[in-house]
Image: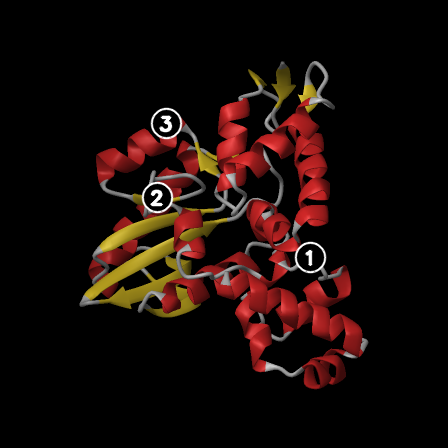
Amino acid sequence: MIITKASGEKEAFNRKKYEESLGKVGLTVAQAKQVATAVYQDLYPEINSEKIFLKTQTILKNKDRLFAAKYGLKRAIMNLGPSGYFFERYMAAVLSAYGYKTKYNQFLQGKCVEHEVDIVAEREGKKYMIECKYHNRPGVKSDVKVALYVYARFLDLKDVYHFDEPVLITNTLCTTEAIKYARCVGLKIIGWHYPAGKESLEHYIESKKLYPVTALLSLNAYLNRAFRESNIVLAHDLLKFTPALLAKKFRIKIQLAERLINEARQLTAA
């Protein structure tokens, strides 16, 4: 069965890969096969991957909302927007959880010109210049121009601020040319499914349960905006509140506050 990816590319539906993705959010092998069968029955030639995602989310919500929240992680990060500023804040919070001292949205005068650096991070005597490339639509990749741009900034700033390494963090994929250039010049890339294993973006998030607040299924558009304005970017930030305090601060019903806190507790404890 040929499907249409968000990028517009056509490819065969890989059921094994699909079932493996379900296993990563906690489903057993039998449950993953059951979901895959239900989804496969609704496939038709060149169906959009967005419809597959939505169908999967609906099934998972009926099984266990925790599964649905984890499965929707990539989409949750895209919902941090609309601008990349909130992705920068989120990534600074993620890095802080790994022991980095971070500052975001820094204006630094380089050897030639001034630069707005997304994150300056330090750990174990090393200093990193980090640029965050955020996309709020699926199917968009960071290309070689992005990698060139990041490294050029690093070259102008490294001697002035004693940066040891440039890093590009993106919530999607990078093109082959961007990766090739980055490897050549020593630019570290952290992206979705890249590099494979413990250095990928999702591993940084999932290994310490650093889910964004947008992963909570009870979140609405009003609260998404209100939480951003209050610098609440991680789901576990809600655990600082009692339901009564959360309801009062954001003027929401106590029942909604209870659901949000319960979802955050489940997501960060799973």
Q: Which mark is residue 62?
A: none
The residue singled out by tag 2 in the image is 189
**Foreground disc of the pair 3, 1:** 1
In the image: residue 103, left or right of residue 45: left
Q: Amino acid at mark 1?
A: Leu
Q: Amino acid at mark 3?
A: Glu
Q: Position of residue 133 (x, y in %)?
A: 48, 47
Residues at circles 2 and 1 in contact by the CB criterion of under 8 Å: no
Quarter holding residue 1: top right
Q: Residue at x 72, y 35 (%)?
A: 55
Q: Position of residue 162 (x, y in %)?
A: 20, 62
Q: Secondary structure at mark 2?
A: strand
Q: Amino acid at mark 2?
A: Ile
Marks 3/1: CA–CA distance: 36 Å
The mark nearer the N terminus, 3 or 1, is 3
Which one is nearer the viewer's eye here, 84 or 94? 94
The mark nearer the N terminus, 3 or 2, is 3
Q: Position of residue 234 (x, y in %)?
A: 54, 66
Q: In the image, is residue 119 above or below residue 232?
A: above
In the image: residue 135, left or right of residue 205: right
**Foreground disc of the pair 2, 1:** 1
Residues at circles 3 and 1 in contact by the CB criterion of under 8 Å: no
**Foreground disc of the pair 3, 2:** 2
Marks 2/1: CA–CA distance: 30 Å
The residue singled out by tag 1 in the image is 217
The residue singled out by tag 3 in the image is 177
